[in-house]
Image: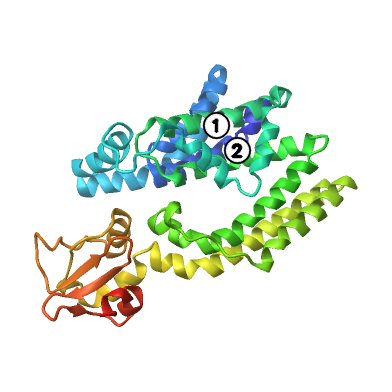
Amino acid sequence: MLLALPWIAKVETRGLPAAAVLIGLGVLAKSGVPLVLMLPLAWWGRRRIGDLLRPRVVLPFLVVALPWYVACYWRNGMPFLRELFVKQQFQRLTGVADHQQHFWYYLPVLLGLLLPWTPLALLLVRRTLYRDPRRAFLLALVVWGVVFFSISPNKLAGYMLPLLPAAAALMGVALAEAENPRPLLACCAALLLAFPIAAQVLPYAVESGITHAPWPKLSAVWTLPLAFGVLAWSLDARSRRLAAVFTLAAAAGAGTIALKWQAGRELDRRASARQLWRQISPRAAEVCVANLTPGVQYSLNYYSVTPLPACHAQPRRIEVRQNAGGLPYLWDSLSSGMVDPLAVRIVPSLFRD
């Protein structure tokens, strides 16, 4: 969509073949969803829609996207079409919700994903910003994406990721043209606190919800956002806005690395079934699933590829269990004890007696 901006503004078509290749990659990733998200492009160019239908644009898209679908249909036939398009596309949009949320769910999600730049969204309410058709087009991409995903009863935060480049481009343009954005930049600096707080809270929030996560503990690192805010303010006051933005961007990048370093291992243990599968895989033929939360079940299915059978349908010696609010563990039904020593650290309450 960003490569199509010259076509939006000046009917410049040189970037359209490359845009078609990228749309083809999007279709490989998410089937029909990228085609729906690009509808604003077709609307903006409706009077010159022929440019999008020329062979130099259509053929790169087909070369990238079509062979895999043809190969999968050739091998699997109609079950492939039913599973991918009917079940995973149309039924997710109109059917029973596995991840049901309120209609307005994506508004706070989108603002949260823009951290620490979320305050800059206030700059987007200026009507004169959209005199340039490219900016109006980017706004339409974001708005249409939020509306489209909000229609579906199935909602996941990750669905907002394709909208972030357009939103970031708009916020960058608005920031460059703002007369005095220093208070907003200071607020962006304050939101850098989200990184050290998330490092403590995120693993528990992902596992069982933010309301069940512990309160974060104060730390000296919490004073760093204040220093970055003062630095960004002073740089912008001296007409060095780009340096001010790069200062906050570098701080956000460092915060992301620190968050991954500090919380990554705990997230892997609490929010992913990767370590669980490592315990299971050497003895997978002996294992069944007794009870797991949906999130852990999906994750385990991802790593096992072929889902493990449910214990009530196909009993096996080793059961995968999960207590309310706890982590999954392996249980030997014959010896009535834990299977792996690692589980002692995961569910110590079982050994207190």
Q: Residues within 10 Å of mark 2 (few under 14, many from 20)?
A: some
Q: Position of residue 285 (x, y in %)?
A: 16, 72
Distance between mark 1 and mark 2 Cα atoms = 7 Å
- Horizontally, residue 322 falls left or right of residue 181, namely left
Residue 293 seen in this snapshot: yes
Q: How many numbered marks have been drawn onto this rendered protein structure?
A: 2
| Furthest residue toward front | 353
Residue type at mark 2: give it: Ala
Label 2 residue SS:
helix
Q: Position of residue 86 (x, y in %)?
A: 26, 36
For this rendering, which residue is in front, 237 or 43? 237
For residue 351, what is the image quadrant?
bottom left
Q: Identify the mark at residue 166; answer none if there is no mark.
A: 2
The quarter of the image holding the C terminus is: bottom left
The quarter of the image holding the N terminus is: top right
- Horizontally, residue 168 falls left or right of residue 94, namely right
Residue drawn at point x = 13 percent, y = 63 percent: 311
Residue type at mark 1: give it: Leu
- Horizontally, residue 101 falls left or right of residue 235, namely left
For this rendering, which residue is in front, 121 or 71? 121
For this rendering, which residue is in front, 263 or 273? 263
Name the N-terminal-most of marks 1 and 2.
Answer: 1
Q: Position of residue 145 (x, y in %)?
A: 49, 33
Residue contact at pointers 1 and 2, CB within 8 angstroms? yes
Q: Looking at the image, is 292 positioned above or below residue 167?
A: below
Colour theme: rainbow
Q: Where does label 1 land, which residue?
A: 141
Q: Residues within 10 Å of mark 1 (few under 14, many from 20)?
A: many
Residue drawn at point x = 51 percent, y = 42 percent: 109
